[in-house]
Amino acid sequence: MFLIRNVKSGQCMDLPDTGANPATTQVSMHDRVPVGDNQEWYALPGASGGSYYVNLASNLCLDVPGWAHDGTDRNSSTPLTIYPCRHEGWAYDGADDHLWRRWDGQPVTTAARATTPPPHTPSHSTPSSPRS
């Protein structure tokens, strides 16, 4: 498990309150909270050398909202959210925009958790319609 912490502010990626949050919850920054809060993440290997960043409390992946079935995501000003990790109808072999890399290109160290990607999830939208 790890925290995603901003170097300048020292704040961590956080979800509202404590415990699990539902899909589409926005990610924000907050001061470090003692262990047990929903600031903890783990990484699972994904395709193309990327990793899924999975929130420990919610078991949902860090997401760039505004999915487009043809891979032309354009919501660069929309806050990050959490969302189910995979679906067989999504772009990039079902991973959509849930794969991440460290800025230096090195693999993320994974926690002692399952080493397989999260399972395909039930469809919350059809591949031909955008999700929010």
Image (cartoon, helix red, strand yellow):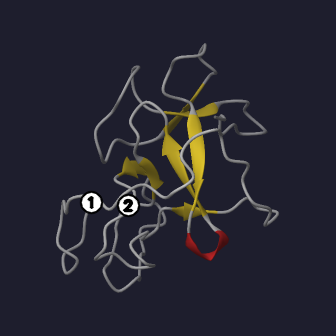
Checking the image for residue 65, the label placed there is 2
Q: Tell me if I can see residue 80 in this picture.
A: no
Q: Could you tell me residue 86's position as x and y percent?
A: 37, 63
Question: Image height check: is 38 above or below 105?
Answer: above
Which picture quadrant has residue 95? bottom left
Residue at image mark 1: 132
Checking the image for residue 3, the label placed there is none
Q: Residue at x 41, y 20 (%)?
A: 18
Q: Could you tell me residue 61's position as x and y percent?
A: 44, 50
The N terminus appears in which quarter of the rendering? Answer: top right
Query: Would you say the residues marked 2 and 1 are in contact, meaning their CB atoms lie under 8 Å apart?
Result: yes
Question: Image height check: is 56 above or below 74?
Answer: above
Q: Residue at x 73, y 58 (%)?
A: 102
Q: Could you tell me residue 8's position as x and y percent?
A: 78, 38
Which residue is more in the foreground, 47 or 18?
47
Q: CA distance from mark 2 to mark 1?
A: 6 Å
In the picture as drawn, the residue positioned furthest to the top comes out as 34
Q: Residue at x 34, y 70 (%)?
A: 67
Which residue is more in the foreground, 23 or 51?
51
Three-letter residue code for mark 2: Pro
Q: Is residue 75 left or right of residue 13?
A: left
Q: Is residue 64 left or right of residue 111?
A: left
Question: Image height check: is 104 above or below 91?
Answer: above
